[in-house]
Image (spheres, helix red, strand yellow):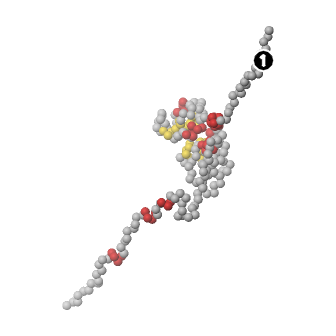
Amino acid sequence: MAIEDHENPHRVIKPKNRRIMGGDGLEEEENHRWPAWLKPLLKEHFFVQCDVHSPKSECKMYCLDCTNGSLCSLCLAHHNNHRTIQIRRSSYHDVIRVNEIQKYLDIFGIQTYVINSAKVVFLNERPQPRPGKGVTNTCKVCYRGLVDDCFSFCSLGCKVAGTTRSFEKRVKYTPTEPENSSSSSSGVEDNIPDPQSLAPSTPHLPTSTSLRKRKRKGIPFQSPLQ
């Protein structure tokens, strides 16, 4: 006698595992948005002496597959068939050529510059107290002045920071001049003494007449001949 397998009407149907976009899900999404090597690259120090090879060997290479720190030219012998890039310097800031980084990363919206006849992008933001006069477009993260209006970020680091969900925009620097020089919003300037009061007093120089304590001798007269 065949036994029919009837479905239990009281069986609890468990839903399939679904990806819930909670706090951990958002963090996981942020981690997958960028390559695993990008954030370590932005934190790395370049143009330092190699600890393994000659002190004269500068570490200006980086392996995207190993992400184990900056490398010198002699270190590349242990990274055959790996994806390596070269970091360059411009005004003491790290840059990378566009034709190298765009093979592995989308740099859309990042300001490019031409240095030594080659297009480059900066790795991290460069401090700037205030944008120059007449600048209409600035970086969305650090407010650095941008040359072209079609760009939104000044560096790779600013794009990573500006495209994350947890990014909080800084307060833009707006220089203002107080209406009354004697008033201050913080009251700090009220406690600062007048610079003239801090200057040493100038010693009183005597006048020309006071320097002469004695009168000049008169014109000598010859005694008459006797």
Q: Is residue 225 depicted above or below 186 in this figure?
A: below
Residue 197 picture quarter: bottom left
**Looking at the image, which residue is at 63% across and 36% down?**
23
* Of residues 150 and 83, the one drawn nearer to the viewer in this rendering: 150
Can you identify the residue that label 1 sits on? Answer: 6
Q: Residue furthest right?
A: 1
Q: Is residue 139 visible?
A: yes
Residue occupying image coordinates x 58% and y 63%: 179
Name the image quarter holding residue 17: top right
Which of the two residues, 90 or 17, is positioned nearer the viewer here?
Answer: 17
Image quadrant holding the N terminus, namely: top right
Residue at the spot x=77%, y=16% of the render?
5
Q: In this view, does 161 lie to the left or right of 6?
A: left
Counting from the top left corner in percent of width and height, residue 148 is at 66, 50
**Foreground of the two, 26 or 37:** 26
Q: Where is residue 200 in the image (x, y as percent from the top left)?
A: 40, 64
Residue located farthest toward the bottom when viewing the structure as drawn: 226
Is residue 118 visible to the viewer in this orientation of the structure? no
Name the foreground residue: 141 vs 193.
193
Badge 1 density bin: few <14, some 14–19, many ≥20, Cα 10 Å: few
Q: How many labels sit on residues?
A: 1
- Location of residue 167 in the rendering, given as x and y in whole percent from the top left corner: 62, 43
Mark 1: amino acid = His
Residue at the extreme left: 226
Secondary element under disc 1, as helix, strand or loop, is loop
Give the vertical position of 203 relative to 61 (above or below).
below
- Which residue does the image show at 26% across and 86% down from the upper left? 221
Which quadrant: the C terminus? bottom left
Residue closest to the far front: 10
Side (left or right) of 48 relative to 167 = left
